[in-house]
């Protein structure tokens, strides 16, 4: 069974938690260029046409923009 997929990731939003009004506390990260990363499949929460949502350390989640085609990411996760 495949445990990782390789994606080209770039800008991302880190969700650090929620405030007293239940609003997300976020941090926007803009990068100068995309980079290849191995993503553990068991950390993937969802995939949209633009973002992949991944769990992170300290109960955070990250919305990563990816460069691959949506159909290609679906195929990688279906194997």
Image (cartoon, helix red, strand yellow):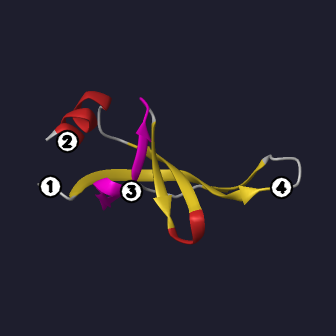
Dot 1 or dot 4: first in sequence order is 1
Residue picked out by circle 1: 2
- Left or right: where does residue 50 sit relative to residue 69? right
> Which residue bears the numbered disc 4?
19
User: Circle 3 is placed at which residue position?
Assistant: 43
The residue located at (20%, 59%) in the rendering is: 3
Using residue 25 as the reference point, say whether residue 2 is left or right of it: left
Instruction: Pinpoint residue 8: horizontal percent, then vertical percent.
Output: 33, 51
Q: Earlier in the sequence, mark 1 or mark 2?
A: 1
Q: Residues within 10 Å of mark 1 (few under 14, many from 20)?
A: few
Spatial distance from mark 1 to mark 2, Cα to Cα? 9 Å
Element carrying mark 3 = helix
Separation of marks 3 and 2 at Cα, in angstroms = 14 Å
Locate residue 46 relative to residue 62 in the image: left or right. Answer: left
Q: Which residues are magenta?
A: 35-49
Query: Residue placed farthest to the bottom in the image?
Result: 58
How crowded pointer 3 is (Cα within 10 Å; few <14, some 14-19, many 20+) is rated as some
Q: Do tag 4 and tag 2 residues touch (Cβ < 8 Å)?
A: no
Q: Is residue 43 magenta?
A: yes
Give the Cα separation between the discs numbered 1 and 4: 37 Å
Q: In which quadrant of the rendered image does the C terminus lie?
A: top left
Q: CA distance from mark 4 to mark 2?
A: 35 Å
The earlier-in-sequence mark between 3 and 2 is 3
Name the N-terminal-most of marks 4 and 2: 4
* Labels 1 and 2 touching (C-beta < 8 A): yes
Q: Which residue is mark 2?
A: 76
Q: Element under label 4? A: loop
- Image location (x, y in percent) of residue 34: 40, 54
Q: Secondary structure at mark 1?
A: loop
Residue 41 placement: quadrant: bottom left
């Amino acid at each position: 069974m495949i445990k990782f997929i390789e994606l080209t990731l770039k800008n991302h939003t880190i969700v650090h938690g929620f405030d007293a009004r239940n609003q997300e506390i976020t941090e926007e990260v803009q990068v100068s260029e995309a980079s290849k990363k191995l993503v553990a499949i068991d950390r993937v929460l969802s995939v949209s046409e633009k973002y992949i949502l991944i769990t992170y350390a300290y109960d955070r989640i990250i919305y990563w923009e990816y460069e691959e085609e949506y159909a290609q990411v679906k195929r990688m996760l279906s194997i």
